[in-house]
Image: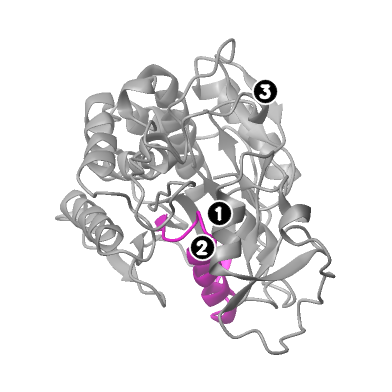
Amino acid sequence: TMLRLGVLLSLLAGMSAVPLADLGNHKGERLIQFNETYSRWMTEKALFDYLSSDQECSGFMDVTDHRHLGEKTVTPASNLPLNISYGDKVHSVIDKLSPSRLVETVTHLSTKFRPSRYYDSAAARDAAVWLKTQYENAASGHPNVQVSLFEHDWEQPSVIARVQGSGASNEIVILGGHIDSINSKNPTTGVAPGADDDASGSSTVLEVFRAFMESGIVPVRTVEFHGYAAEEVGLRGSQDVAAEYVNQNKVIAAMLQLDMTLFQAKDSKQVTLVTDYTSNELTAYLRKLVESYCSVPWANTQCGYACSDHASWHKAGFPAVFPFEAPFSKINPSIHTVDDLVDKLNLEHGMEYAKLAAAFVVELSQ
């Protein structure tokens, strides 16, 4: 979540922006996009220098493999009612959410895969395989559930748990988070527990899946629970998945990303909703869900370009939303460091995001 942008000009002084389609001779470089019109070819070292800067936070996308994502018109979903209609079902899932189970998952992800879950490492792969096993255990006895690894061109795969809908519609509702972590000062070998960023979000996605399975609810629309690889190096995992779904003409009704959900900033007892690079209509619906199912009010914030994996889906043309644990002006100062630990997190605060995610999945899958 949220890497560094303020040092960009000093790193790349004297270079000119390049069109996304301009391949040229860039062996050993990646095409990094900082907004819709501004991109740079960068070596891995230059990119890591960028990540390790202490300047203003912002996001970026590594679009080397997906320069044309968003150019193809995707098949729109049917008009979602966006009403509060299934309160009993939502509460049956919320009632099965387990705070202790959630914190156990966050603790395991942030302590057992050392030194970090850096996307191109054996530990990162082990973390994804472990997460897949947790989904498989929770899905045991449910015949309409498939759990799989989505392999990439690096060590860590993404994880996808698919709950097949009972209706004739081929529409999909997606709940996602990212599995990888990073130490911005030493990306490849530095210690990065990543308890908040993003063991919190990927664990919450799993917890909602567990509660959804235990509730016995059969969705009408298909629901998928995603754990993405390589978010910290430019949303590479989620771009791979989104591009594949575009190529397969899959219909995405709605996507919600959970990236950092357990840190409560001072004077921020609220559910914060990101309003830029997200679906306005679906974000308005999240406000209704917060008012109906959460114990705290909602507030708005902005995160800038490509600050998490929802941006891959938004760029592809699908409706995507991003609730975040705090206003971005009060972002957790421990992320991307050795200090992103479980003991700095607030479980009560994080459960509000679990309730919102559960409501999103149930209301939109019926």
Q: How many marks?
A: 3
Can the viewer see residue 170?
no
Q: Which residues are magenta?
A: 225-252
As drawn, is 353 to the left or to the right of 311? Answer: left
- Mark 1 is on which residue type? Asp
Q: In the image, is residue 353 above or below residue 217?
A: above
Q: Horizontally, is 352 left or right of 54 in the view? A: left
Q: Quadrant of residue 312?
A: bottom right
Q: Is residue 148 magenta?
A: no
Query: Within the image, what quadrant is residue 350 found in?
Result: top left
User: Could you say where residue 20 lies in the image, as x and y percent from the top left?
Assistant: 76, 76
Q: Which mark is residue 186?
A: none
Is 231 included in the stretch rendered in magenta?
A: yes
Q: Residue at x 68, y 77 (%)?
A: 67
Instruction: Looking at the picture, tell me which residue is in the foreground, 331 or 52.
Output: 52
Q: Residue 356 or 158: which is nearer the viewer?
A: 158
- Report helix, strand or loop for mark 3: strand
Q: Is residue 282 left or right of residue 220?
A: right
Question: Circle 2 sits on which residue?
Answer: 238
Q: Earlier in the sequence, mark 3 or mark 1?
A: 3
Residue for point 41% across, 34% down: 196
Q: Amino acid at mark 3?
A: Ala
**x and y, in percent, of residue 203 in the image:** 33, 41
Q: Residues within 10 Å of mark 2 (few under 14, many from 20)?
A: many
The percent position of residue 315, horizontal first and vertical second, equals 69, 62
Q: Residues within 10 Å of mark 3 (few under 14, many from 20)?
A: some
Q: Which residue is mark 1?
A: 309
Q: Which residue carries the number 3 mark?
A: 299
Query: What is the quadrant of residue 53 in the picture?
Result: top right
